[in-house]
Image (spheres, rainbow, N blue to C red):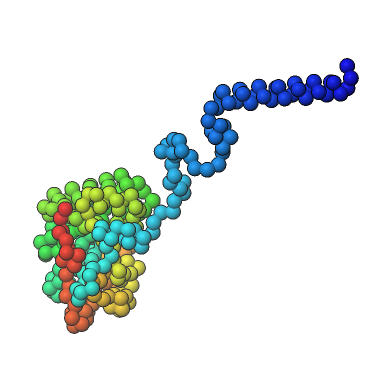
Amino acid sequence: MSRSTKRRMIAALTCAFMTALFCCILCLFPDTSKAFHTKGPLTEDTDSLDTTPASAKPLNLGELRRKYSETFKFRGPEVKQIALTFDDVPDPRFTPQVLAALRKEGVKATFFVVGHRAKKHPELLRAIHRDGHIIGNHSFSHALFKNRSRSQFQNEILRTENIIANLVGYRPKLIRPPYGEINEEQVKWAKKSGYIIVNWNVDSLDWKGLDSEKVKQNVLKAAGPGSIVLQHAGGGTGSDLSGTIQALPEIIQTLKAKGYHFVTLPELLQTKKYK
């Protein structure tokens, strides 16, 4: 057999083999687009795909306030009203002195209660309520919640709520997360459950143990229409809140002289004190 004849036979056999292989592929994949097309949009099973970014960046406090503006407040409307708020109560070292100053000035305020302290000092919580002040929920243990789960936040709020309800007769609508920190899942739960989260836009920084002049300056330079002022009537071991207690009468008198009226948070935010 000549070389040319062998080449023709090999070519013919190769062609026959390729034709048979192609026919097999067509039998296995009638729609050749599924066998050969690897780009373009998927048209099958897309519902099973998770399109959420694996590492979505958590919203910061400003973004949370904008997204949940009906639930997350940090100031009131632009009116000549100011709400004084006091965190970390009840504390027998400081709360009675704050109550006495407010009573003397004829001002009602809002107090955010730590559950384990209310459990330890129930009469002091009742005294806040008897003086006509509003009670808010500040969690049971004063934990930093932004890195904790929704269920942990929920359990602390409900535990404190039950203590407050047993002592003063209502379940507070207002929540202030410790340190003002909270995450989106916790905000969603609060919204669904009928709460309002309230931070502040004027910080006295009294927890630093500042003297009365510095506390007064911090409040007066920042206060304006609809302001929510953060102060403390309770603290940790070694805390010194004498500066905020001494500054309180002058803060009130100065702002009254400028035409401001002091109101509670439910009055400022036009909401109820209870759920």
* Residue in the picture at 27% in, 75% down: 223
Does the image show residue 267?
yes
How far across and how far down the image is residue 244, in percent? 26, 72
* Residue in the picture at 71% in, 22% down: 16
How far across and how far down the image is residue 45, in percent? 44, 35
* Residue in the picture at 29% in, 51% down: 188
- Farthest residue toward the right? 2
Report whether 37 appears left or right of 273.
right
How far across and how far down the image is residue 119, in percent? 20, 51
In this picture, is 247 found above or below 187?
below
Label count reads 0
- Farthest residue toward the bottom? 257
Report whether 12 appears left or right of 262.
right
Pick whichever, 75 or 152, lies toward us: 75
Report whether 60 appears left or right of 172.
right
Q: Indicate the quadrant where residue 80 lies.
A: bottom left
In this picture, is 227 found above or below 177?
below
* Residue in the picture at 25% in, 52% down: 191
**Quadrant of the frame with the N terminus:** top right
Does the image show residue 113?
no
How far across and how far down the image is residue 272, in percent? 15, 59
